Amino acid sequence: MDFTWTEEQETIRRRAARFAAEYVAPYAAKWDREPSFPESAVRACARTGLTGLTVPKELGGPGASTVSYALAITEIAAACSSTAVTIAVTSMVAETIARLGTPEQQERYLPPLLSGEFAAGSFALSEPGAGSDAGALRTRAEYRDPDVVIHGEKSWISSGPYAGVFVVWARTGEGEGTRGMSAFLVEPSDPGFSVGRKEEKMGLRASPTVSLNFEDCHIPKERLLGETGRGFRIAMQALDGGRIGVASQALGIARAAIDVVERYYQVHSHRLGAFEKGRLAQMKAEFVAARLMILRAAWRKDNGVPFSAKAAMAKAFSTETANKICQEAVNLLGEDGCTDDYPVERLFRDCRVTTIYEGTSEIQRIVISRSFLRDAT
Ligand SMILES: Cc1cc2nc3c(=O)[nH]c(=O)nc-3n(C[C@H](O)[C@H](O)[C@H](O)COP(=O)(O)OP(=O)(O)OC[C@H]3O[C@@H](n4cnc5c(N)ncnc54)[C@H](O)[C@@H]3O)c2cc1C
């Protein structure tokens, strides 16, 4: 076992840290306050080669490892969680198209996703009545040669107003529940597609979350992604990898909170007693435990070892730990922690949603418990 970074991992981590320091950190508080979407930053991220990191080189991507991806998302999230989630979801969309797309789909969507021509890609699974239970979705897709016609509504879709392509899940009728779902690629200019209501959120305010409407939305039938009727499996595989991204995002937020507390005590050293030192030590130990879990899940994905349960463990543990760390950070700063003079207030709000999207902690525990009989480690 080797705990040192490879050259690739260190290069990408440094590049992400430099990108975050130049394009993201100075503006994060302003984007949160206004709120405004970090459009120029996410386009710059792609130009820097940090979007879609795991897309293979032969498809025009950087061909980097999932470990490197986790390191990059952690660095960016430490500066701005909204920027990090936009890049993470766009990367998940690019990776899914790279994995399952036809050569024509790859040629049409990967270059604009990877170059920043598209500010974002969106992942449209959730619906008003289908969050944790994706099998309950009601959006329907009907084949009317030469088109597919989509009818329904999606809710809570990140980056919706800025996405150049959406992966949209709809019922195609091969069966009930988790069977009979397929995935399609939808473009914002497709007839019958529109972006709906924007949510006003407690955190992650610079990441727009919207509903999407499909009213007899016509798309060419060649936009089917992967096999028809296999949509649930496609979504679950994408989410397995996506959870490493959300866990890394939470880890970045936690690191930023610890950094704020340490800097605070450098200035207010009279406030740093044995009690505070003990709390800070515990925060750091839990941070390292979360990081190891994330890296293990990422390493397994890179090495073709089943990683679904490990990604679920990393997601549940890291996001809950990060929430605890942010709460501690606010507590330790006392009244200062409740003002926007210090970023822990924003970090605390931004962190909250990480235990919810891409599967709540309860759903992660269901995924983990299903693996008990197969693999106890
Ligand atoms: C900021 C934000 C961004 C998002 N972005 C996207 C996006 O880009 N694309 C997308 O498709 N979706 C997105 N979502 C939706 C997100 O994935 C869902 O909110 C999440 O899956 C939970 O679904 P729900 O909100 O319907 O909660 P519910 O499923 O109604 O769950 C409510 C509560 O019940 C618990 N629960 C549900 N089922 C079980 C069970 N079987 N056992 C035990 N407990 C259970 C849950 O853990 C939760 O605590 C986003 C959500 C948010 C808040």
Image (tube, grey):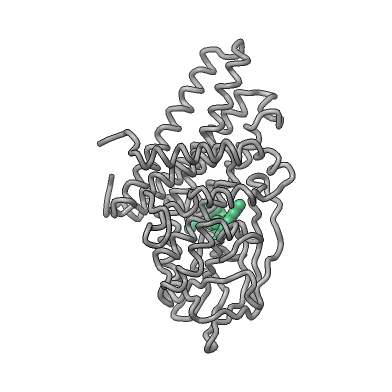
Q: Is residue 164 above or below residue 356?
A: below
Q: Which image quadrant for residue 126?
A: bottom right
**Quadrant location of the N terminus in the rendered image:** top left
Q: Nearer the viewer, residue 130 or 165?
A: 165
Q: Position of residue 219 (x, y in %)?
A: 57, 79
Q: Residue at x 46, y 22 (%)?
A: 281
Q: Is residue 72 above or below residue 285?
A: below
Q: Is residue 99 above or below residue 314?
A: below
From this viewpoint, is residue 10 visible? yes
Q: Nearer the viewer, residue 328 or 219?
A: 219
Q: Residue at x 50, y 52 (%)?
A: 51
Q: Position of residue 45 (x, y in %)?
A: 54, 48
Q: Which image quadrant for residue 220?
A: bottom right
Extreme residue toward the bottom, this view: 145
Q: Position of residue 55 (x, y in %)?
A: 41, 57
Left or right: residue 322 versus residue 12 is right
Ligand 1 rendered quadrant: bottom right
From this viewpoint, is residue 320 visible? no
